[in-house]
Amino acid sequence: MTQASGAGPIDDVIVHTRLENGVKVCIRAVRPDDEDRLRSGIAQLSQESRYLRFFSVAPTPPDHVIERLVEVDGHRHLAWGAILSDDPQRTAIGVVHAVRNADRSQRGEFAVGIVDAYHGLGLARMLTAVLLVHCRIEGIAALDAQILNENRAAMAFIQSLGGERSGSDEGVSDYVLDTGAALAKLRASEEPSGLKDVFAAFAVYLD
């Protein structure tokens, strides 16, 4: 799908909203100069969360992994992050990625990570909603996710968006998510309340 007529670049959009506990956050596209902020956010993850997200208990991923996470171009690699609005340090508390399988592929890899202290407050759903709008514009029709079998919360999350299990291997389950169907589910949802702010900010791209 092409960008809506009259709309500016989608990665210029900034969403100002609140988590379910009232904490103010802004959601914006990840930039290459966010590397230090990303490192700081990963350092806030518990050992369990780092293992479930990166399949490793190392205190921080290798430099090449961090560098890849901030190599965002809005076409091959789509990424959005959430930052605490009232924090002078503008601390990052969540990020979501879609990495296209090939430059012209309609399929990509999906990953989302939320700092432990902000689990269960609707942030993953809001970040994913933003990413799905971007996928819609960029023509990414499906997202694949690899989830450790013990990560029941991640499985429940992707299943709630319509994700279907497509295979498994050595303790890891593969899921595929139809981006259009998932976006429709989130647009029809009333929870979390911050979704209203997300879709209001991107209304011009959804006409």
Image (cartoon, rainbow, N blue to C red):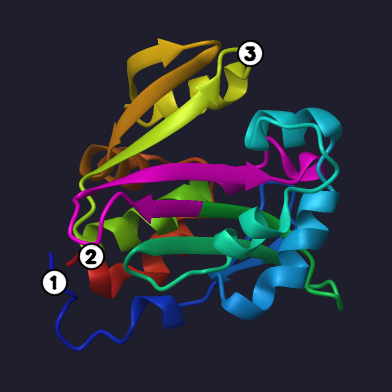
Front in this rendered view, residue 142 or 168: 168
The residue under label 3 is 150
Percent x, y for residue 156?
50, 20
Disc 3, SS: loop
Residue at horizontal 19%, vertical 58%?
139
Return the mark for residue 162. Answer: none
The residue under label 2 is 137
Percent x, y for residue 11?
42, 77
- As shown in the figure, which amino acid type bears the numbered disc 3? Glu
Dot 3 surroundings within 10 Å: few (below 14), some, or many (20 or more)? few
Q: Are marks 2 and 1 in contact (CB under 8 Å)?
A: yes
- What distance separates the C-alpha of mark 2 from that of mark 1? 6 Å
* Residue 23 is one of the magenta-drawn residues: no
Residue at horizontal 84%, vertical 32%?
47
- As shown in the figure, which amino acid type bears the numbered disc 1? Thr
The earlier-in-sequence mark between 3 and 1 is 1
Q: Does residue 13 lie above or below 96 as drawn?
A: below
Dot 2 surroundings within 10 Å: few (below 14), some, or many (20 or more)? some
Q: Does residue 137 lie above or below 109 as drawn?
A: below
Disc 2, SS: helix
Give, as a single range, the part of the protein colored magenta. 97-124
From the image, state whether disc 3 or disc 2 is nearer to you.
3
- What distance separates the C-alpha of mark 3 from that of mark 1? 39 Å
Q: Quadrant of the C terminus?
A: bottom left
Disc 1, SS: loop
- What distance separates the C-alpha of mark 3 from that of mark 2? 33 Å
The residue under label 1 is 2
- Left or right for 2, reference 168: left
The earlier-in-sequence mark between 2 and 1 is 1
From the image, state whether disc 3 or disc 1 is nearer to you.
3
- As shown in the figure, which amino acid type bears the numbered disc 2? Ile
